Image (cartoon, grey):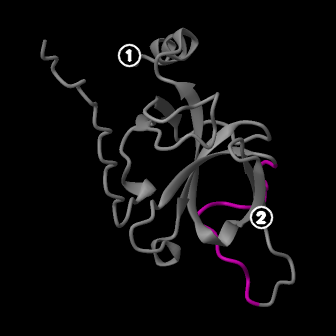
Amino acid sequence: MLQSPKATRRKAKPAPAPSFVDPAKIATRFYGLIVRGDCLAPEFKDGDTVVVDKEGPLERGCYGVFYHRPELVSPGEWPLILKRLATAVPQEVTLPYREHPDSEVKFIVVVEQSNPPKRWAVPCEDLLAVHHCMGRADDPAIKAKLAAEGWWI
């Protein structure tokens, strides 16, 4: 008896990285992003859709979308990343930020990921913006918060 070969599922090819994403041109307060990679699993997994609030608080322990200056992003790399804030964005910093050339103080944000566990400093001067990630779009609590603001998913 002949048997058909097992069907194999091909993994979708990841979307190419955009050359530049200008956070200043995002017109709405709330927007969605699709997570690429598992560096923040189990909180966020590859393919999850997250809701981002441009005006949300950027406190220690929350998740943020970091928009890097385009001149600092290597070709083929994403100009934005989703990471957990190990430290809050300094209150003295308004993004985009430039250090004073005569200053000896350099403002940073410490970020972290889960897989593999890693923590590092991001100079505030390297960023255009950081937006608050509210959580996964399928979370009923996130849907309720958006509904309270007059939005729906």
Q: Which residue is at a point 73% across and 83% down the rendered structure image?
A: 100
Q: Looking at this view, is 90 or 60 the one in front? A: 60
Q: What residue is disc 1 on?
A: 152
Badge 2 vs badge 1, beta-carbon distance below 8 Å: no
Q: Amino acid at mark 1?
A: Trp
Q: Which residue is at a point 46% across and 12% down the rendered structure image?
A: 147
Q: Amino acid at mark 2?
A: Ile
Residue 123 drawn above or below residue 82: below
SS under mark 1: loop
Q: What residue is disc 2 on?
A: 108
**Which of the two discs, 2 and 1, labels the residue nearer the N terminus?**
2
90 magenta-colored: yes
Q: Is residue 94 left or right of residue 28?
A: right
Residue 111 drawn above or below residue 58: below
Q: Which residue is at a point 49% across and 72% down the rendered structure image?
A: 73
Give the residues drawn in magenta, as a range: 87-101
Local crowd at mark 2 within 10 Å, few (<14), some, or many (≥20)? Answer: some
Q: Is residue 57 left or right of residue 51?
A: right
CA gap, disc 2 and disc 1: 35 Å
Looking at the picture, how far across and down is residue 19, in whole percent?
Answer: 35, 67
Looking at the picture, how far across and down is residue 141, in whole percent?
Answer: 58, 11
